[in-house]
């Protein structure tokens, strides 16, 4: 339950061993590779390797992602559900080159099938559009590319569907008698006709058609009658449908390879990360330089691997000037590790700071349960998270988060037992309907003992604030800052302790100690100020220090507010259901209401508990700014890789 001690690694090896060494380090999963720093000037023969290999792996990664998208587009679904565990695979099998190449070949085949399918479907859409355009002219025996004879002009014309045909004929009759009009067909927007006119009446016909809102169509791209063109398109469309069906059949045959493609995608991601790590090395024609960090407890394991490859290396403890560069790894037990998601979300501690997880865990779990306080809610949280952890075998981060809610569920059940709450007042209300009133045993209830709940909230706040101050004192003494501890925290303890003593009748001695504590606070807070700054600093301490300290304590009243709100909402739904004076309506309304209350409280209690830790607790002692330790390791989503030998590939 502490920040893991780190070692800095500098190693020089042969270029021929580089790839295999990186794979061994990846299998160990305990070395974070960093770009070398402070390289001697006469080592200018070393340079970063090119991205050629990374580009190759990224291309394969994109091919695999595209292939899985193809399968998903054609109806492939992931196996199992929320509680289905990831399949387990030995590391040697996961990195099997033959299996990877086979999956990559399938991916390329799928992508090629999809490319052809897309092209065919695009062509089919064009053919279908062409056939739709021909349909109005199917009964016309005139070739579509017919332009007329030596003395006539041929027109293929469209007119809006809402335009009466009589209007068109009237306009033409008024212009000339030297024409012949054949109405053909229509679609949703237009109606179509064929017009043949004498060459001498061409201009009059054009003017009349324009007045009637007609549009001349250019069908010269077609050869033959509409019926002939339509039959040709039908034949081409039939052949194209055969091609499309064949491509779809090929894709369907590869549906069973979805899991192989997912495994290969995971493998490609691991290879891409390895290649990115390689870019942090420095290479020459025959050697390479590697720098990074590893946990001190893994020193022997890493040393054995480096010796196997004949590496020249140096392991050293970080100097104080390097603390801001040291990656942070927290070593916790299952209970305190459940706080990792919160710490990582806020900020990792500095290397010379303190691991907040074991300090925060009892408060976070207690506060959450205090606000939820319901036995049924607690049981649901415990059973749900335990079932998920057991069956789904989630990754470390998800497991820690589920473990956090499991522990909060235990706390919720405990506080619910103290308040006699089971789905609020579900059992008393149900027993009243059944005619046999029952009251669950309880130590107190939020709605009847509101003042006691408020006092309890403030007491919990005082305990956490004072714990944060105590940790700050220890840290300041550890970092050789006793004066800061004396003036910033111990002076407050003196003030608060002597104030309580005076209230309890301590008389003059208590007031003297209180004055001494106040003087220490003022002197300590202004000792670095000069001149007028001491006066303004003293005013700031009196106003901000006192008001800030007590406002921090009052922030914990939110514990009471959330406890009351959850109890009231549950009681309201139970009372609403009880108005029917029947078991079935009561149970249905109560369960629906409590489900909503549970969902609301899960979010509300988590957020408010988180706020108290980050603002009121961490602010008193926490030194943040650390960067999380990110070793080169096998980190997968679809599959759980079991450590073992690595097969080259």
Image (cartoon, rainbow, N blue to C red):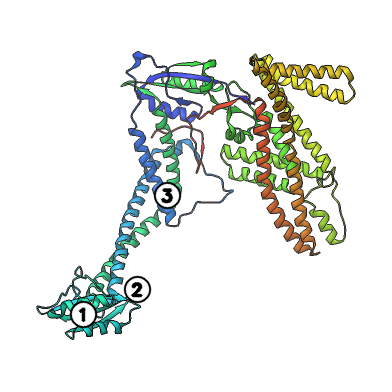
Nearer to us in this view, 1 or 458? 458
Local packing at callout 3 (Cα closer than 10 Å; few below 14, some 14-19, many 20+) is many
**Disc nearest the viewer among 3 and 1:** 1
Does residue 386 appear to the left or right of 144 in the view shown?
right
Q: Quadrant of the C terminus?
A: top left
Is residue 374 visible to the viewer in this orientation of the structure?
A: no
Q: CA distance from mark 3 to mark 1?
A: 55 Å
Which residue is found at the position 17% from the left and 81% from the top? Answer: 197
How far separated are the C-alphas under marks 1 and 2? 20 Å
Q: Can you name the residue that lies furthest to the left here? A: 150
Give percent across and percent down for residue 8: 49, 19
Q: Can residue 294 be seen by looking at this rendering?
A: yes
The answer to whether marks 2 and 3 mark residues whose Cβ atoms lie closer than 8 Å is no
User: Disc number at residue 195?
Assistant: 1
SS of the residue under disc 1: strand
The x, y position of residue 353, in whole percent, is: 61, 22
* Front one among 459 and 433: 459
State which mark lies toward you, 2 or 3. 2
Instruction: Answer with mark 2 or mark 3, whichever residue precedes in sequence.
Output: 3
User: How much space separates mark 2 and mark 3, taking CA atoms?
Assistant: 42 Å
Q: Is 489 above or below relative to 171?
A: above
Figure quadrant of residue 626: top right
Judge by depth and name the residue closer to the eye, 144 or 101: 144
- Marker disc for residue 68: 3
Residue, disc 2: 189
């Amino acid at each position: 339950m502490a920040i893991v001690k780190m070692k800095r690694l500098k190693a020089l090896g042969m270029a021929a061993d580089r790839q295999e060494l990186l794979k061994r380090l990846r299998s160990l999963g305990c070395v974070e590779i960093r770009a070398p720093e402070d390289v001697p000037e006469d080592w200018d023969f070393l340079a970063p390797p090119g991205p050629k290999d990374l580009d190759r792996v990224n291309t394969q990664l994109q091919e695999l992602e595209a292939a899985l998208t193809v399968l998903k587009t054609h109806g492939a679904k992931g196996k199992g559900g929320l509680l289905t565990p990831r399949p387990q695979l030995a590391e040697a099998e996961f990195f099997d080159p033959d299996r990877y190449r086979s999956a990559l070949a399938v991916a390329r085949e799928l992508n090629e099938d999809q490319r052809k399918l897309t092209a065919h479907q695009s062509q089919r859409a064009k053919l279908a559009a062409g056939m739709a355009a021909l349909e109005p002219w199917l009964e016309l025996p005139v070739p579509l590319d017919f332009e007329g004879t030596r003395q006539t002009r041929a027109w293929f014309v469209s007119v809006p569907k809402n335009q009466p045909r009589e209007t068109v004929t009237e306009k033409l009759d008024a212009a000339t008698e030297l024409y012949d009009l054949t109405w053909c067909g229509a679609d949703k927007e237009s109606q179509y006709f064929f017009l043949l006119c004498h060459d001498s009446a061409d201009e009059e016909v054009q003017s009349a058609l324009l007045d009637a809102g007609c549009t001349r169509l250019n069908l010269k791209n077609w050869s033959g009658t509409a019926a002939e063109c339509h039959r040709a398109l039908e034949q081409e469309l039939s052949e194209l449908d055969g091609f499309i069906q064949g491509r779809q059949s090929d894709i369907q045959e590869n549906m069973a390879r979805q899991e192989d493609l997912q495994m290969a995608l995971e493998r490609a991601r691991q290879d891409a990360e390895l290649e990115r790590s390689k870019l942090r090395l420095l290479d020459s024609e025959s050697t390479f330089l590697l720098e990074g960090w590893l946990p001190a407890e893994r020193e022997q394991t890493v040393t054995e691997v480096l010796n196997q490859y004949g590496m020249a290396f140096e392991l050293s403890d970080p100097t104080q000037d390097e603390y801001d560069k040291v990656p942070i790894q927290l070593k916790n037990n299952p209970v305190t590790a459940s706080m990792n998601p919160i710490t990582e979300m806020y900020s990792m501690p500095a290397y010379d700071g303190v691991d907040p997880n074991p300090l925060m865990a009892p408060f976070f779990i207690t506060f959450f349960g205090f606000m939820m306080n319901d036995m049924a809610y607690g049981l649901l949280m415990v059973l749900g998270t335990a079932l998920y952890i057991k069956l789904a075998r989630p990754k470390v981060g998800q497991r820690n988060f589920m473990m956090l809610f499991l522990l909060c569920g235990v706390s919720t059940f405990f506080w619910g037992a103290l308040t006699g709450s089971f789905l609020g007042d579900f059992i008393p209300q149900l027993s009243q309907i059944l005619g046999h009133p029952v009251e669950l045993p309880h130590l107190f209830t939020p709605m009847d003992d509101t003042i006691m709940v408020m006092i309890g909230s403030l007491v919990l706040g005082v305990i956490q604030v004072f714990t944060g101050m105590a940790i700050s004192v220890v840290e300041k003494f550890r970092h050789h800052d006793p004066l800061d501890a004396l003036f910033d925290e111990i002076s407050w303890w003196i003030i608060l302790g002597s104030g309580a003593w005076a209230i309890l009748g301590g008389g003059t001695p208590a007031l003297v100690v209180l004055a001494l504590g106040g003087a220490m606070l003022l002197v300590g807070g202004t000792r670095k100020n000069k001149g007028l700054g001491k006066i303004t600093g003293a005013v700031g301490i009196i106003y901000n220090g006192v008001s800030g300290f007590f406002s921090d304590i009052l922030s914990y009243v939110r514990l009471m507010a959330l406890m009351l709100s959850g109890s009231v909402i549950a009681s309201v739904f139970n009372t609403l259901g009880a108005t029917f004076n029947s078991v079935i309506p009561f149970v249905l309304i109560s369960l629906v209401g409590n489900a909503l209350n549970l969902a609301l409280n899960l979010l509300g209690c988590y957020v408010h508990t988180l706020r108290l830790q980050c603002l009121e607790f961490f602010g008193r002692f926490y030194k943040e700014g650390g960067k999380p330790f990110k070793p080169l390791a096998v980190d997968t989503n679809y599959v759980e890789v079991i450590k073992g030998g690595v097969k080259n590939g």
